[in-house]
Image (cartoon, grey):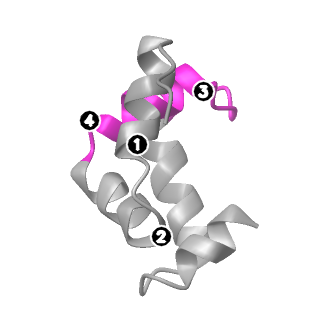
């Protein structure tokens, strides 16, 4: 469902997005992404970050999750 939502904001098919993410981020090749693996990998690849940002700017959320800190709003 997330890939379909992202697909609305890019010319890539859901399959192309999924392949890009796994080929780029799944460094150990196990076919699964941990949260840490996703965050680290996405932050290192501008194209993936651009796709995510087109759907919803998650950069601050990813930073908070990665650092383990919570901020009151």
Instruction: Tell me which numbered mark, 4 or 3, is placed earlier along the sequence.
Output: 3
Instruction: Name the residue at 60% across, 27% down.
Output: 35
Q: Residues within 10 Å of mark 1 (few under 14, many from 20)?
A: some
Label 3 belongs to which residue? 35
- Magenta stretch bounds: 26-45
Q: Secondary structure at mark 2?
A: helix
Instruction: Name the residue at 51% across, 19% down.
Output: 70
45, above or below 35, in the image: below
10, above or below 19, in the image: below
54, above or below 72, in the image: below
Mark 1 or 4: the one toward you:
4
Disc 2 to disc 4, how far (Cα)?
A: 18 Å
Q: Residues within 10 Å of mark 3 (few under 14, many from 20)?
A: few
Disc 1 to disc 3, how far (Cα)?
A: 15 Å
Label 2 belongs to which residue? 55
Instruction: Name the residue at 43% across, 59% down.
Output: 52
Mark 1 or 3: the one toward you:
3
Q: Residue 65 vs residue 49: left or right? A: right
The N terminus: image quadrant: bottom right
Instruction: Tell me which numbered mark, 1 or 4, is placed earlier along the sequence.
Output: 1
Mark 2 or 4: the one toward you:
2
Label 4 belongs to which residue? 44
Label 1 belongs to which residue? 24
Mark 2 or 3: the one toward you:
2
Closest to the observer, 12 or 51: 51
Disc 4 to disc 3, how far (Cα)?
A: 14 Å
């Amino acid at each position: 469902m997330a890939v379909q939502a992202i697909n609305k904001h890019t010319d890539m098919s859901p399959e192309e997005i999924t392949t890009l993410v796994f080929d780029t981020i799944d460094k150990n090749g196990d076919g699964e992404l941990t949260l840490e693996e996703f965050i680290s990998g996405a932050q290192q690849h501008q194209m993936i970050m651009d796709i995510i940002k087109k759907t919803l700017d998650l950069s601050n959320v990813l930073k908070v999750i990665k650092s383990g800190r919570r901020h009151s709003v």
